[in-house]
Each structure stands twice: as C-alpha cells, then as structure tokens.
Amino acid sequence: MTPQPFQPRELTDYDRLFGRLTTYLDARLDAITNQTRIGFAESYARDEVLLKRIEAVEATLKVVIDMQRETFSAMQTMQQTMQQTMQTMHQEMRDGFATQAERHKELMVRVDKIEKQLNPPKDAAE
C-alpha cells in the first residue's frame, strides 16, 4: 500500500486536531508543573518545620548531656570528699582508741599502785 497524499481539506482537519491535542497537552503539562511546584513548596515547608524541630531536640540533648556531665563531675567530687572524710574519721578513731588504751594502761598502773598501798602484800607484813 502506498501512502496517499493529503488533501488540503484534510490538512485543516489535522491542523485543528493537532491544535486541540497540543492545547490539551500544554494544559496538562502546566497542571502537572504547578502541582509539582506546589508539592515542592509544601515539602520544603515541611522540611523546614522538621529541621527546626530537630535543631530544638539537638539543643535540648546538648543541655541534658552538659547537665549529666556536671552532675557526674559533682558526684565524683562528692565521692572523693566522702572518701577523704571517711579516711580522716578512721584515722581519728584509731588515734582516739590508741590514746584511750594508753590512758587505760596509765590508770591501771595507778590503780595497781594504790591497791598495793592500801593492801600491802601479806608476805611483807608478816
């Protein structure tokens, strides 16, 4: 089959159909483009909101981490102070008991002397 030549009357019908098709396609393309722009704008707005929320969470976490570090440092300092206090108290107790033991010995020696003076040995009296 060989192609048939177009008649001038047919060309205007084709031009009219082509014009309608291109008008329709241009309208659809514009609608899709506008939807895409709106979608991008909405997406960008959502992304901005999310970014601000993430930044707020990061700032809060930074504050919490800093507070935890400070608390940990304070607890370490407190623990060291308590250990030093306990060591000091332990040493003072040892010293106190040693002093009491010495005094007890001295008192026992005095008591023995006094008892010897009050109750002389019977062998020596006879």
Image (cartoon, rainbow, N blue to C red):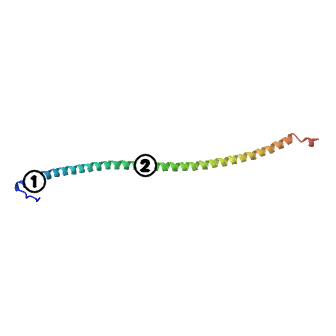
**Residue displayed at 83% across by 42% down:** 114
Badge nearest the viewer, 1 or 2: 1
Q: Residue at x 71, y 46 (%)?
A: 97
Q: Residue furthest front?
A: 1
**N-term-proximal mark, 1 vs 2:** 1
* Residue found at the very far right of the displayed protein: 126
Q: Amino acid at mark 1?
A: Tyr
Relative to 10, is 84 on the left or the right?
Answer: right
Residue sitting at the far bottom: 2
Q: Which residue is rendered at x = 86% and y = 42% of the image?
A: 116
Marks 1/2: CA–CA distance: 68 Å
Q: Quadrant of the N terminus?
A: bottom left
Disc 1 secondary structure class: helix
User: Which label was assigned to residue 61?
Assistant: 2
Q: Amino acid at mark 2?
A: Leu
Residue 59, position in %: x, y?
40, 49
| Residue pointed to by mark 1 | 14
Give me the residue at 67% from left, 47% from top: 92
Mark sitting on residue 77: none
